[in-house]
Amino acid sequence: MSEAVIARPVRVPSRGFGRRLRDWIANPWGRPRFLVLITWVYVISSLAPVVIAIQFSFNDGRSLTAWQGWGGARWYWEDPVNSVWHDPALQHALIQSLKLAGLDMLIATPLGVMLAIGLARWRGRAASASNFLMLFPLVTPEIVMGVSLSLAFLNVFTFIEPSTTAQMLGHVTFSLSYVVVIVRGRLFSIGRQYEEAAADLGATPWETLRLVLLPLLMPAVFSSLMIVFAISIDDFVISQWLSCGADCDTIPIRIYSATRAAPLPSINALASIMVYFTLAAVGISYLVFRFMTRGERPKGGEAGRGMVSQMGAFDV
Amino acid sequence: MSEKSGIYPRWLWQAFALPGVVWLILLFLVPFYAVIGVAFGGVDPIFLIPVPAWNPLDWSAEAVIQTLSGFLPGGDYWAVFWRTTLYVAVALALCLLVGYPVAYYISRHARRTKSILLALLVLPFWVSYLMRMLAWVNLFAPSGYVNDFLAWSHILPDPPDWLNGNPVSVVLALVYGYIPYLILPLLAALDRIDKSLLEAARDLGASPARAFLHVTLPLSMTGVLGASVIIALPMFGDYYTPNIISGSPTTSMLGNQIDLFFHGGPQPQIGASLTLVLSLFLAVLMTYYMYSVARSTREVRDE
């Protein structure tokens, strides 16, 4: 790796592709070739399987491993029996996933925003304990959460049976901490001076909260909504442990059981639909995020940085 | 610190935090206590269902001790425990081996491509884990593209059966699944390093390699440890990856054992004590991570 580390941050005027290729052949160790290579190999190999899986959702035949030609929307809605639209099990899984993610978004985000504001400003021993408690769901392996929730619903909260409600409660529990971490980051970065200025100008506490703090928090609230949606729709373990059987199957549960059976390309179509959904959500959220934080970015080249720092939600 | 600038009534923040804290107590702490109760509880002699013991005075440690003794050499869980640790260690090492250079390149060298690389790095986050595993299974199926390629290129004229009890594919699948969760925090940690320190090292005559070894690497160590913990914790509890990729008992991990006791056999009590042991085993990692997060939060807050 030692050759690769030319860490001098100097601006080099950009060169054309042909010129760069010639330079590279002339001196393969001059610039961090190794790093460029490993980065692009990683990026491509991380995405290629997904692209190929989406390709097979358009396969004309029933195979998931051999390409039999372009089948169009056969596995999406054209096939009268096995397409996502006509297979009741697949259709139900899609609806169940969207339902859970939607409920989770609507419950976890307000709860988490309030918790974040409260924990960031409330001082004392109980506050530190709560702050610590809030971090636990982030580091607990999902299987431990799944086991504990299912045992709790079996033995303590016996009035809640394995059901969509139980799944929803579980999803909110693990997404809450993500919201807190995102919103808290934003709270620290905006500081308190705006609120103090508003108070000095005569705003009541309620007005300060509603007219100053809340609008400033909006980008974080929006990111939280998107991330809660994404992690909820991605979740397999909690959904499975609190599942009530076929009626509670979400898309990941369907995919899980399909990989061990003989899957049809419709399972790829189902998974691809989810990718389309989330990509649309990313696109929208990126645009909205840029719109909301316009004027806060130092220069254009930094676009996307905010999003990434929001995404690395583990990193506080 | 201008904490006491009473814009707001004193009770307001507590009231804000209350619903969330209550939620976490009811749906995180109480359930975890239920695991303890079931693990230390007894079994109904007639229905053979576990009877949780809520009062610590009623605890019987029988099942937990039995489970713990299973982890000793020759015990029931000895093999699966070491297999899990080995898989996680190898997968983690591979993740770091690939992830560190990638994060380093994007943080330091990528200029015009930085935004696009960042977007591509984030993309796997938005594709469901199970979808990525499904894609992986299809590629590695006996008639899949990987075997086609291996046979066509004569690298391996007789490609192995990747999807049945092959530890290599389980470890590779773990790497493939978890590496995005390692790279992004690592990237954030590398981005946070003050570049002027590097310039100072270079001005003082350090070679690029020495500057990396003596400045960048030590400063990024916290990030490396944090990111490693972030992916090691869920890997230890993973059971769906080995199930999907292999499904064979020869590659099962600790999570598979727990899953088996709850979903395969009617022994939730042993499952609960195994879960408890797993959590205790991971407690060190969790504590380290939470301690470092709490410390960095305090730093931000007191700035």
Image (cartoon, rainbow, N blue to C red):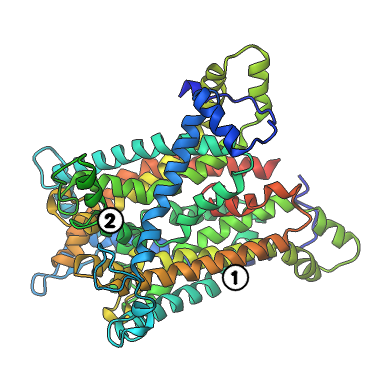
Q: Which residue is mark 2?
A: B139
The tally of labels here is 2
The quarter of the picture where residue B143 lies is: bottom left
Name the residue at 36% across, 72% down: A269
The residues bearing labels 2 and 1 have C-alpha atoms spaced at a distance of: 41 Å
- From what the image shows, is residue A286 above or below residue B45? above
Q: Residues within 10 Å of mark 1 (few under 14, many from 20)?
A: some
- From what the image shows, is residue A154 above or below residue A67? below
Residue A109 x/y as whole percent = 57, 68
Q: Are marks 2 and 1 in contact (CB under 8 Å)?
A: no
Residue A124 x/y as whole percent = 62, 51
Please state which amino acid type lies under the numbered disc 2.
Leu
Residue A169 x/y as whole percent = 43, 72
Q: Is residue B292 left or right of residue B177?
A: right
Residue B287 in view here:
no
Q: Which mark is residue B243?
A: none
Name the residue at 38% across, 49% down: B178
Q: Nearer the viewer, residue A48 or B263?
A: A48
Instruction: Find numbered disc 2 in the image and state the secondary structure of the residue it sits on.
Output: helix
Name the residue at 28% across, 68% down: A68
Q: Nearer the viewer, residue A204 or B245?
A: B245
- From what the image shows, is residue B213 above or below residue B58? above
Q: Chain of mark 1?
A: A
Q: Which residue is mark 1?
A: A110
